[in-house]
Image: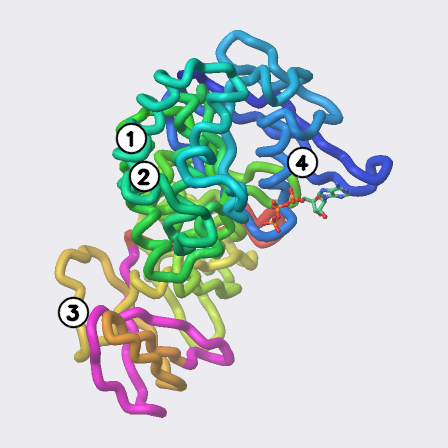
Amino acid sequence: MVEVRLENLKKYFDKGRVKAVDGINLTIKDGEFLVLLGPSGCGKTTTLRMISGLEIPTAGKIWFGDRDVTYLPPKDRNISMVFQSYAVWPHMKVYDNIAFPLRIKKYPENEIRKKVKWVAELLQIEELLDRYPAQLSGGQRQRVAVARAIVVEPDVLLMDEPLSNLDAKLRVMMRAEIKKLQAQLKVTTIYVTHDQVEAMTMGDRIAVMRQGKVLQVGPPVEVYSKPNSIFVATFIGAPEMNIVDVTVKETDKGVVLEGEGFEVPLPEELGELLRDYINKTVVFGIRPEHMTVEGISEFLHVKRKAKIKGVVDFVEALGTDTIIHARVGSKIIKVKIPGHVAVELKKEISIIIDLDNIHVFDKSTEKAII
Ligand code: ATP
């Protein structure tokens, strides 16, 4: 096991025109499951490839514990990788696929047998050892790829979108299995995905990336409840956070956020945080699940509330939840109500906002103020 430290890591392509990774500082703790999360092209794979040794950094350093591995070839790093494409060898039986990395390391056959048996049990693929990959389902093939990665007991396990070729149901199942397996083995794991649900459910911590930089690192709940920027706020959560421009006003009711067709009076201490923004435009953020509709659903544990008016524009009945699209001014605000509720289109509704879960961002820097 090992701690991985990335120090001002950079990778530029095309003579510096493409800044794929642009100065990442990140420590992945010994035994931690860290998820690199971000949209396509933000530099996740390139970061992982530098950690694996498949890519040489333009600048910066990579440490495994107190070992500088920046320029070490992959084979000398004691890492394993699992990719999106299953990358199991079609001409080898499952047993030989798993045994392969041990044979490269010249383990004696009796030890190889023991280790293959150990991982096969761990991943519940004992019955498949005698089959060829073509005789396996996608999920089974991915288990073989994971088995082959962990049989060598790597210091660091690197996974690049390993579940994205699986169907939705299998993906949910494998998510839990990989998470449990990692917790059992306590191997330092770096997992790349663009799927925020995968990141939330698997990571001990999530590093949210955008344009080659890490914007925020923290445990899933922290990144969800205290996003440090509009980008992180809207990337995590589904449906995504409602974002509306408002003006901060000082009134006889205290500080209020004034938007088109609505007004949100703020509790005193939140108003204080916006002192410097009086009469300025800021960005108001509220998640669909932190609002409800009067007369339809109740907020049981919410202490401080505000009310705004809207008109029902569209309703998505998901079974588990109902998403109400309400027109407020010229904007559509989404409200998520647990369970199935009947809502009339075009009806005027009162939307209740949980004031302890509101967000306010600076309009120009897009950074969180509240
Ligand atoms: P995805 O989720 O789509 O795989 P990503 O976040 O993993 O995206 P990277 O694959 O790391 O992103 O790519 C980051 C940026 O670097 C992209 O703009 C990509 O086009 C560019 N890039 C990656 N590899 C190379 C290369 N070998 N030569 C030139 N540009 C590259």
Q: Nearer the viewer, residue 202 or 7?
A: 202
Q: Quadrant of ligand 1?
A: top right
Q: Is residue 15 left or right of residue 9?
A: right
Q: How is the image coloured?
A: rainbow
Pick the quarter of the image with the N terminus: top left
Q: Label 3: few (<14), some or many (≥20) within 10 Å?
A: few
Q: Is residue 181 above or below residue 86?
A: above
Q: Quadrant of residue 266?
A: bottom left
Amino acid residing under circle 4: Val
Label ID, residue 298? 3
Inter-mark Cα distance, 4 to 3? 46 Å
Q: Label 2: few (<14), some or many (≥20) within 10 Å?
A: some
Inter-mark Cα distance, 1 to 2? 6 Å
Mark toward the start of the polypeptide (1 vs 3)? 1
Residue at horizontal 53%, vertical 46%?
Answer: 90
Amino acid residing under circle 1: Ala
Q: Which residue is mark 2?
A: 179
Mark toward the start of the polypeptide (1 vs 4)? 4
Inter-mark Cα distance, 1 to 4? 29 Å
Mark toward the start of the polypeptide (2 vs 3)? 2
Q: Is residue 264 left or right of residue 360?
A: left
Q: Nearer the viewer, residue 226 or 32?
A: 32
Q: Which residue is mark 1?
A: 183
Amino acid residing under circle 3: Glu
Label ID, residue 21? 4
Q: Quadrant of residue 220?
A: top left
Tell me residue 133's x, y (percent): 46, 48
Residue at horizontal 17%, vertical 79%?
Answer: 295
